[in-house]
Image (cartoon, coloured by chain):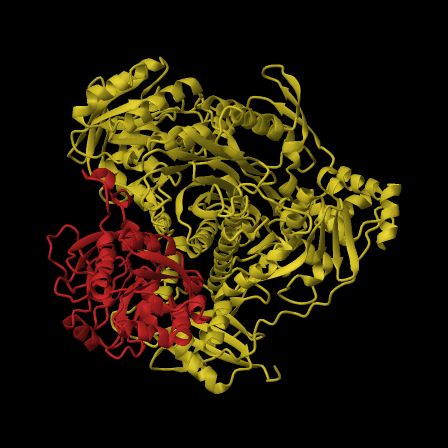
Chain colours: A red, B yellow
Amino acid sequence: MIPRVAVLSGFGINCETETMAVFEMAGAKADRVHVNRLVNGELDLEDYHIMAVPGGFSFGDHLGSGRLMGNRLRFGLREQVRKFVKSGKPVIGICNGFQVLVKMGLLPGDDDVSLTQTASLALNDSGHYENRWATLEFDSESHCIWTKGMTRIRVPVRHGEGKFVTADKNLLDDWGEGGQLVVKYVDPSTEYPSSTDEVLPYPISPNQSWRNIAGVCDPSGLVFGLMPHPEANHSTWLGATWTRENIEHGEGEGMKIFRNAVNYVSENFDN
Amino acid sequence: MGSQMEIYNFEVTTRDIEGLTDARGDSVKSMLESDYGVQVNNVRVILGYQVKSDMSLEQATRSIYDLFADPIIEVGNLENSLLDNKNLFSEAPQIAIKVGFKPGVTDNAGQAGLDGLRTIFPEISSASQVATAMTYLFWGVPSDISPNWLSSKLHNQMIERSSISDSKDCQKSVWPSLDFPERPKLTQKPSATVNLEVSDEELIQISEKGLLALNLEEMKAIQENYRDPKVRAARVELGLPEKAPTDAELECLAQTWSEHCCHKIFASKIHHVDFETGEDAYIDSLFKTHIMKPTLDIQSEVNWLLSIFHDNSGVIAWNDDWSLCIKAETHNSPSALDPFGGAMTGIVGVNRDILGTGLGARPIANTDVFCFGPPDYSGHIPEGLFHPSRVFRGVHAGVRAGGNESGIPTVNGSIVFDERYLGKPLVYCGTVGIMPRLLPDGRESHEKTPQPGNIIYMVGGRVGSDGIHGATFSSLELTEDSPSSAVQIGDPITQKKMIDMVLEARDLGLIQVITDNGAGGLSSSVGELAELTGGADLDLAAVPLKQPGLSKWEILVSESQERMTIGVNPEDCEKFEKLAQLHEVEATAVGTFTDSGAFVVRFGDETVAHLPISFLHDGCPQLQLESEWRTPEHDPILFPDVNHIEMGEILSRLMARPNVASKEWWVRSYDHEVIAQSVIKPFCGVNHDAPGDAAVIAPIQGGTQGAVISNGIVPRYSDIDAYAMAAASIDEALRNAVCVGVDLELIAGLDNFCWPDPVESAKTPDGRYKLAQLVRANRALDEVCRAYNLPCISGKDSMKNDATLDGEKISVPPTLLFSLIGNHSDVRKAVSSDFKQVGDMIYLVGETHQELGASELAFMLRDESNGESGIGGRVPQIDTSRNLSLYHSLTKAMSNELVSSAHDCSDAGLAAAVAECCFGCDSGADLDISDIFHADINLNDWGALFGESLGRILVSVKPENSEIFEASMEGHECNYLGKVNSGDNITISDQGIPILIASMSELRDSWKNTLNGGIN
């Protein structure tokens, strides 16, 4: 079977082209789905196996990044989204898409998919938007289906509000113990594994996120979001320093995430 | 909606959580220190939202944390001021300043807030409004800093208002407040008739008072038209005033004939006298002679020039399936008045040029080149101007917001500093687009297919009083009286929604013709497209307005942003409107394209303008101008007596010059990687901080064919010779493209001229010389582009870059930005500028001459000697055939993977290029440059180290490839200089004797510290 991916678009989402491309490269069929086509019933989320909320500047990041788009989903598509997640289908939010999932309460989320916000993404300590490359390390123990078998990747970060925080620090421990703090910024000069909870210096941690958190998953491990852009490293020639490296050209370091989800769907769904 | 409109005041600030900072406040604090040297202890920010709506108090209360405040990290409040909450602000601030927009100014966050409210409460009135404000709170302000001074640095009076609470107010808990920014009501004025049967003096007065920017000849041509008996007879029949134009007609003509829209100086007949050579000649249109003709000649030899000159951007065939288009614009005057809004509308405006090319192209890359006054300028700033550092910050923020929010990467750019940009900054915004060669319905995408009977749609934003007279205003010099209505703020999200919708409509075959609404608004967009079918009928009463009451001529010429004009077949209208609705984009039928021979403008049943297409587009009389070239004289450079260590210090000071210094802090806040296509990025090297040359993108995901985008700009050379300036700009753009391995068989250029007024007048006594500079620059463009087989496919000119303020006239140096787009056959073979590893062999290819005239070194020595040392001397000269054949050999070596790195030698010469390549490798270098001296017997150490001769590239090669590399460069100047070494020292010797020694890491610090933005 060929998994079908709904890549959301509209209102300032702007990474849908490359997000569709990486799913297609991973063997899925990706559709550009304007959010309003789900709201007005022209399309049904149920017909898809994976939902992706790409990066961008939905509603210009006004009133907080991801907030207005999160509300469109939370108020306009509430039951469709809950049903989708509860039926065991993977969801990913990248950058602005991650902000959307956090603001609508789907991440870090809860067993009941209650859509209650428990964390947020604050302005980077630098106070402004930045585009730079970072190295990420994955929690090998996590049950997140998107990151299975991954160790480290290099990817660009491109955001102004990526500092993962929460009001209740105990929650962080719960999420950590539950394997939900899947991916962290790491010092590339260290050996794997060496992720740490102590906030790393700028710009190794580009935003001074708590515990160096770059991305999280929900308790089921099916919903995953991260600030950096794995889809922007789909081919070796898009790397930051590829001209310095002796490499065989081909698939980039970010592709494994998308392959994992496509494989998961192929293994768990008949059609 | 019968319910009462209430005003609700919301406030939001950062919650007090350990490990969370008020980053907005911190940024203001850093900005004050970096730009003004003012240190305050603490700054906090409160966001304010004023909502005027029929929603209930209960709904308002719910929206605090469902919409305005983040429940996790922010505190929100309704009605009471957060400042009264002692848990949040235990100590009253010393100063509190609230800043909000003036009524009628675009408030994007407010618009988003309204959308957000209607998402939660769809039943509330669509006439509800949201206005945003920011309150800045200061603690520990130095005693010599007044609240008014702080306020002036936090807002722009042209578009914003402020309210201040000083320390006494703050102690009494009297907080700053602003009323709801209610737009004043407008009443539509009836159409007026403008009597042109008056004296010449009065004609001029009509033009000046009405900001029409028409000269006497042009006013008389219009006068003459209305004396034509045939015209008069036709007007009687239409019920229009018989003998005189209506205000709408005159405005429409002024827009269409403005310098901005019709390029009168480039179309003029020029009498050119050269006192050096004795030449005395006439040039009938610089544009036709020196820009169009060479490109048409090249077009007859190649098959990839699809659409040139006539559309919103030039189009080239990139491969069998895809074409690329490119356009650059300037937005100088608006950026001088409101740097943020001016620059933002510049970038989103040029994006629309791409969207309006052919049947619609997708913008995929932006380039931005700015020219500013020096950021550390300490001289007098005339009243009405901003300090260059503020212009810089504002322009940067505008382009950042415009580009990032639109999802278009900023892949390349440059920033040039010179005191003469104090009066008018130059803000060049360029965009590259991509189109499938064929649409699903089989039409070629680069050809518009308009038919009489197509319905005219206005799509996107609404028309308001913002942006009236932008085109004519930019055709005038800047004065204290320049109108604020010419300034606008863009709305990237409205535009992004429109782009998504338009591209979908294109692929569904719904678009027959499309163009953007830029300068001149509907009068230009509909007027220009009317030329294609032979007429148009436009109904202004159908045009959706931001506020009622605009006069008819204002609706016609308003340049309100985010609008496209699209022609649709009548049978497709329903589908088109449905698609617009889905994307939440406004699309309104406002008229019909016809073949009546006239552009007819109505307001309902009343005809307000009737302009024959031929008069509108061909009636503007040709200017006759005088040009005189006399070679300027300059004092020679006085070289100080220095040893090799001091020479290293000179290099260090050159690296710290704003023109040379790293712009990383600024460039990093542009998204340069969205669309996942960026192969050669603005930065490279082991620490990602060494400068790239040209950008390489692979726009089809997974594909390995690429496009190269580069820029060349060297206004300094105009001081000696604008011919050399133009030639150097083109060579720089091409050289940068060569450095990454461009395919020289498929390269195209864009010429963007920004000149001081070159028309002799009382205000411009040296107009003849400035025009001669323009003539020489055009001749360079003609000769160099022909030689390089580099057709100019589009371009633009801005010819009034002067400011007269406080009685002082400041004119920009004549500036040509040359932008290049080229093919890259295989991006996997692209080359970056950083040295790759210790032991690699370093070569300089190209000849070095004693060419330090108007060089960065010359300007530095002039500044350091208080003007005793001059900038005179030989300015870099071009040898196109020598350069091109070298470029061919070098790119061939690159495609054979023989070249490890390549970097352009330009500003501050070879020494600076060596340093920059070392930065990328964290290495030193040990070089002996004895061999480069043989090309020019006049060459001294200064010229060898810092000269800016064209056609030179610094290359590194793996030792095992050196022999075959040298063989492949046979017949070209290619000198081995030495090796990349592991230490920190850069040593440059001549015949074994060091002439320059410097520490790489110290050079890097000087290079990075000048423009570090002050924050982080």
Residue drawn at point x = 48 percent, y = 31 percent: B304
Q: What is the tally of numbered marks visible in this picture?
A: 0
- In this orientation, which residue lies closer to the viewer: B808 or B1010? B1010
- Image position, residue B997 (x, y; %): 23, 30
- Image position, residue B823 (x, y; %): 39, 34
* Residue B42 visible within the image: no
Q: Quadrant of the C terminus of chain B?
A: bottom left
- In this orientation, which residue lies closer to the viewer: A234 or B720? A234
- Image position, residue B90 (x, y; %): 34, 79
- Compared across the picture, whether B450 is left or right of B893 comes to right
Residue drawn at point x = 70 percent, y = 66 percent: B549
* Residue B179 visible within the image: yes
In the picture shown, does residue A98 fall above or below B228? below
- Image position, residue A74 (x, y; %): 38, 74
- Compared across the picture, whether A117 is left or right of B759 comes to left
In the picture shown, does residue B716 fall above or below B877? below
In the picture shown, does residue B608 fall above or below B956? below
- Compared across the picture, whether B716 is left or right of B89 comes to right
- In this orientation, which residue lies closer to the viewer: B936 or B367? B367
Residue drawn at point x = 50 percent, y = 52 percent: B348
Q: Quadrant of the N terminus of chain B?
A: bottom right
- In this orientation, which residue lies closer to the viewer: A124 or B129? B129
